Image (cartoon, coloured by chain):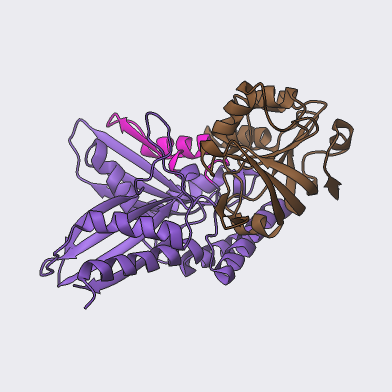
Chain colours: A brown, B purple
Amino acid sequence: MSSVLNTPIRPEDVRPFKVGDVVYINGVIFTARDKAHVKMLSDPQRPFSLHNACIYHSGPLIVKEEHTYRVIAAGPTTSARMNEQTPAIVKQGVTAIIGKGGMSREVAHSLIGRCFYLAFPGGCGILARERIEEVLDVYYAELSFTEAVWKLRVRDFGPLLVAIDSYGESIYEKIQASSRERLHQ
Amino acid sequence: MRSTREAFISHTIDALLEAETRLPSDVRKSLANAVKAETSERAKGQLQSIRENVKLAAVAGLPMCQDTGIPIFFVEIGREASIDFSLKEALGSAVQRATDVIPLRKHTVDPITRASSNEPLFDVLFDFCDGDELSVAVLVKGAGSENVSALAMLEPTQDVLSFVLNTIWESGGKPCPPVIVGLGIGSTFDGCARLAKKTLFRSLDEKESAYEAEILKQINKLGIGPMGLGGRTTALRVFVEKAPCHTAMLPVAVAVQCWADRKARFRIKL
């Protein structure tokens, strides 16, 4: 199954998808990596809502120009570093997480019924740049441009592989189990 | 007349630009072969996205990955060369200038406070060579792959291959496979890490030893595949470098490099 999803994405929108499906996203996504995750969870005045939001694990390379921000490259970062904070982020209403490299079993479990994890090809900073239409806003810029939350408008953002679905099925877990068997052969 | 320091800095910036924006032909060739080796559409798809990204970056003259990494320099100093400036300072200046002109991502922090830092982030290995030139190689190392690199002070009776396979298994999709694996065996605690890192400057076109080929085969049997999503190519290449060690020791370092094996080199007569 391959299709285009528009944001905001509701929990019922992610449920038809199963691991192995390919998705493209249109609309608004928020980048967030290590520091932003801690900040989002501890900030009582968080200036944006995570309800039905799409989080993108990325520390983009963005430069400030006179009246605008220019996206140079914006591929995904290693999602596993955000394992610890992710169940709490999902509870805030996040319905789609984009990243690379996979997430833990605990995270997969926390997604059940409401969110899915989408893999963007790692290292592909320019592929991602091509699908970003506009920088809409930046939050927590004091954390640095790399660690800030960037609100981006994207067009056909992908290809995104459903790697953990909203039933808790994870491609990574399967691969890890089969490779562990081969490791001990 | 332009100072020798300025000439050196200018060459270094050019090398950084080349490394960040143009994946070397040995790696491109290896990725093309990986597409042929894969049988699953998913693995092929990941590799095709990577190849498309590499092409787009070269055309745009922009860094292929937003993690513009840590430049690791390998400087070989000709025995007859005379250098009237600090090489380390000049490399730092080059990295700082490259950060603005290429541009590179500003992701340097103080390791204790984690506050952003303006200090140039790079590492350098020095060696000597014949002649009167400086030979400089740069390797751009991403954090995703550096984070899964590992070092073990094994007991002499323990198995090197098991340690390597465990390291790669644990890293899964995190280092952006297909990876390049540099293995340093022997020497000392820090010595084996340097050996491992140095191997990553070698070309994938070099003929592999039987030992390297065997480790590569074992790694690829794991089936982790491109981006950890399953497949035949978990690693593109294994490089091994060894050095004598104490009879009571077996230091082993595994330096992992992402598919974006960004390398460039230049020679300069000062």
Q: Residue furthest front?
A: A67
For this view, does A36 lie left or right of residue B143?
right
Is residue B226 visible in the rendered image? The answer is: yes
Task: Identify the image quadrant of the N terminus of chain B.
Answer: bottom left
Can residue B159 be found in the magenta stretch? yes
x 74%, y 22%: residue:
A91
Give whichever of A154, B58 is nearer the camera. A154
Image spot of residue B18 (x, y percent): 44, 67
Classify residue A13 by image quadrant: top right
Left or right of B143, for residue A176: right
Question: x and y percent of residue A142 in the render?
Answer: 53, 37
Front residue of this view, candidates B202 and A147:
A147
Determine the image quadrant of residue B85: bottom left
Q: Is residue A23 visible?
A: no
Quarter placement of the C terminus of chain B: bottom left
Residue range highlighted in magenta = B146-175
| Residue A108 among magenta residues | no
Image height check: is B53 above or below B131? above
Which residue appears farthest toward the bottom when viewing the image? B1
* Number of numbered markers: 0
Residue visible at 55% across and 40% down in the picture: B174
A83 horizontally vs B137: left or right: right
Image point 35% across, 36% down: which residue?
Answer: B151
User: Foreground residue, B205 or A183?
Assistant: B205
Residue A160 placed where, x, y %?
73, 48
Quick check: B168 above or below B195? above
